[in-house]
Image: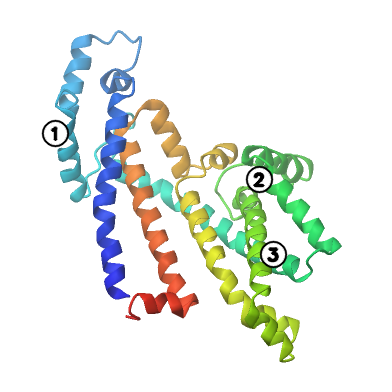
Amino acid sequence: MSRYIIRRLLLIIPTTLLVVLLVFLIMNITPGDPGRMILGVGQGVTQEAVDALNHSLGMDRPVMERYVTYIWNILHLDFGLSYHSRQPVLDTLVKSFPITFQLAFLSILVTVVVGIPLGIISAARRYSVLDGTLTVVALVVASVPGFWLGIMLILIFSLKLGLLPTSGIGTLKHYVLPVLTLALPNAAFLLRITRVTMLETLRQDYIRTARAKGASEKRVIFRHALKNTLLPVVTTLGLSFANLLGGAIVVEAVFGLPGLGEVILDALVLKDVPVVMASIILIAVLFMLIVLAVDILYAYIDPRIKAQFGGR
């Protein structure tokens, strides 16, 4: 097991280099002149000043030479300066990422608390009125666009009832509506995954054997079926968490949260290459680490998987 983890960690290095190269090339072929965008448009800026700034940024050098220089710099944790704020990019990420992390963590927590229990209940009461109701509600909630759900929650709980703030990050109350906006669709999807997987597990021979031996339905579900049900559930949660860490751009924009998603969106609009590059690197590395964590968790849920890795 330890050898597998080391191999996966080492695999992150070439994968990250490839991701950085692709994004670097894309950002360099898209329209837009960094020098012109930094100095401003229509403000009497001469072309000589723009060329001088581009030269100082190294934009007149070959792409691959700039790529190698960039890789060398990030190995020393130097992600450069933002083209527009002229602040270190690392400082920008350090300020914005904790907000996104808190939002993602709370959203996943609510997703687990709501989605898994309701999925188990739906499977245990399959084809009942409760099962049908949960299925319909889950389909509706999962189909609702995130921005529309966020706006509706603002209208109801902020403008009509006056219970929660509409934007900002001052207190825990400010996170309630954004968390619900992200968690409810994910919980609805997780409910469906849990229900389908649980029903498939309950049809297995060992479940019928447990029932034939007189095991109660509660013991069958929580003692025998739940553990095998968790494998696809863990995969869903891991990928959802990784996507949320990538920046819930729409939700952060709706609720005015200065998180990583808003930083990425502003950087793309302004073609702030250093910020975009650093954000992509952070997201790519986090995604690969989360996928690795999910694979490791598999081994502890299912001993058969751990045996394939040599049990070490």
**Position of residue 161 measured from the top left corner of the image (x, y, whole percent):** 78, 45
Residue 9 horizontal side relative to residue 240, left or right: left
The residue identified by callout 2 is 165
Q: Which label lies toward us, 2 or 3? A: 3
Cα separation, mark 2 vs mark 3, equals: 31 Å
Q: Which label lies toward us, 3 or 1? A: 3
For residue 9, what is the image quadrant? bottom left
Residue 119: assigned label = 3
Of the image marks 2 and 3, the number of the one nearer the N terminus: 3
Q: Is residue 161 above or below residue 104?
A: above
Residue 269 horizontal side relative to residue 85, left or right: right
Cα separation, mark 3 vs mark 1, equals: 53 Å
**Position of residue 81 measured from the top left corner of the image (x, y, whole percent):** 26, 36
Q: Is residue 294 visible?
A: yes
Q: Which label lies toward us, 1 or 2? A: 1
Residue 154: assigned label = none
Of the image marks 1 and 2, the number of the one nearer the N terminus: 1
Amino acid type indicated by mark 2? Pro
In which quadrant will I find the N terminus? Answer: bottom left
Number of other residues with Cα within 10 Å of mark 2, as a class: few under 14, some 14 to 19, many 20 or more: some
Of the image marks 3 and 1, the number of the one nearer the N terminus: 1
**Position of residue 260 measured from the top left corner of the image (x, y, whole percent):** 44, 44
- Find numbered disc 3 in the image and state the secondary structure of the residue it sits on: helix
For this rendering, which residue is in front, 243 or 232?
232
**Position of residue 230 measured from the top left corner of the image (x, y, whole percent):** 56, 70
Point out the residue furthest to the front here: 205
Total labels drawn: 3
Amino acid type indicated by mark 3? Gly
The residue identified by callout 1 is 65
Cα separation, mark 1 vs mark 2, equals: 49 Å
